[in-house]
Amino acid sequence: MKLVTYVNDGHEQLGLIVNGNIYPLDGLHNDLPNSMAMFLNFWDDLMPLALAAERRIKDGFSRDGLALPYEKAEILAPVPHPTSCRDGYAFRQHVAAARRNRKVDMIPEFDQYPIFYFTNHNSIQGPGDIVCMPDHFKKLDFELEAAIVICRPGRNIRAAEADEYIGGLMIMNDMSARTLQMEEMLLNLGPAKGKDFCTVIGPMLVTLDELEEYEVPCKENHTGRSWNLKMKCWVNGQQVSEGNLADMDWTFAEIIERCSYGVDLFPGDVIGSGTVGTGCFLELNGTGKLNNPDYPEQWLQEGDVVEMEIDALGKLSNTIVKDESDFSILGLKKNV
């Protein structure tokens, strides 16, 4: 099942995508809600009703004025108001390449446990303009990732059961301002201002029943579901990145196990995979300079169009826009 949040009569509306059309979920059954938050909070009760509604549409159900062509809709983040947002570090290829480019050894702790950080869940957005401040443009970067949303409350969730807490998958672009990020992490804290201004998810949430044909075994000595889904990114129409979700070394189930240790997870919590190998300019520039010292660095600029696509999860498009303000926190540094 493919779920989307879109604008309907000026309000956020939860919809179901079938055959290229969006159907307002609350128009398909009296007990179905109009918001993703409500749907996630009553997942076990509402999921069967939504699946039955999807089957009715596929069997020929129609009602005048109910269907909206997907391409005509104003699409928002599928989970527009997450209860929290964490991002993982699950792709060994990306971590190893980034460390190689800095001429340091691979860190052995990567293979011992999955890690994550909290980002700003109030800066979640979907397709459309990404408004950036002047300091963000100092080495502005994308990060090609996938994300899940939690659909059941839980605490101390073991990896063997953790996939049952996944509501679905979606594309994530973890926008990054590298100069801000690197400066604050010199103090062994963060990322904070380098990451908190925008995280893009979307364009839809695809439930796991829709992804069964893509399932593959996870990496050896790991636990949880894995999916063979190609991941790609283009900037201004030029492909810059390609990977596969099956290359995750740590599964979402294992990340959930780590996240839920001693704390409650809630429906609406979003968790990212971390960057796929080749999935950001920071890694690509480093690899380029390692092979050629004269390699020209590339970073996102005002007006750039960033498009991300993951098999079965749709295509996510954003345009980089400059804020009207000229305020700079980098310009406030003291004792320089």
Image: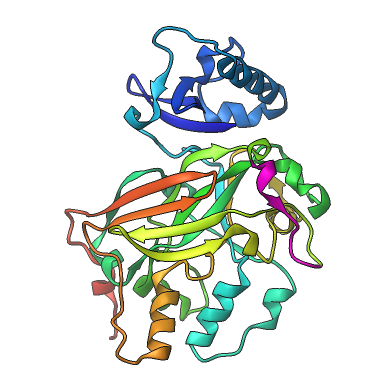
Residue 81 screen position, x and y as percent: 49, 38
Is residue 143 inside the magenta stretch?
A: no
Q: Residue at x 60, y 68 (%)?
A: 91
Instruction: Choose between 147 and 284: the one closer to the eye.
Output: 284
Q: Residue furthest top?
A: 64
Q: Quadrant of the N terminus?
A: top right
Q: Position of residue 164 (x, y in %)?
A: 75, 41
Q: Is residue 41 left or right of residue 173?
A: right
Total residue callouts: 0
Q: Quadrant of residue 334?
A: bottom left
Residue 264 or residue 227, whichever sits in front: 227
Residue sitting at x 56%, y 42%: 83
> Which residue is more in the foreground, 9 or 186?
9
Q: Is residue 109 above or below residue 163?
A: below
Q: In the rendered image, which quarter is residue 320 located in? A: bottom left
Colouring used for the render:
rainbow
Q: Quadrant of the C terminus?
A: bottom left
Q: Nearer the viewer, residue 189 or 293?
A: 293
Q: Please state the horizontal and vertical placement of residue 243, each as a whole percent of the image.
A: 53, 64
- The segment highlighted magenta reads 211-220
Query: Which of the 4 image quarters holds residue 254?
Result: bottom right
Relative to 178, does residue 239 appear above or below in the rendering?
above
Q: Where does the image place residue 273, in percent across and percent down from the top left?
A: 59, 58
Q: Is residue 336 above or below residue 325?
A: below
Q: Is residue 306 left or right of residue 326?
A: right
Residue at the location (18% across, 56% down)?
325
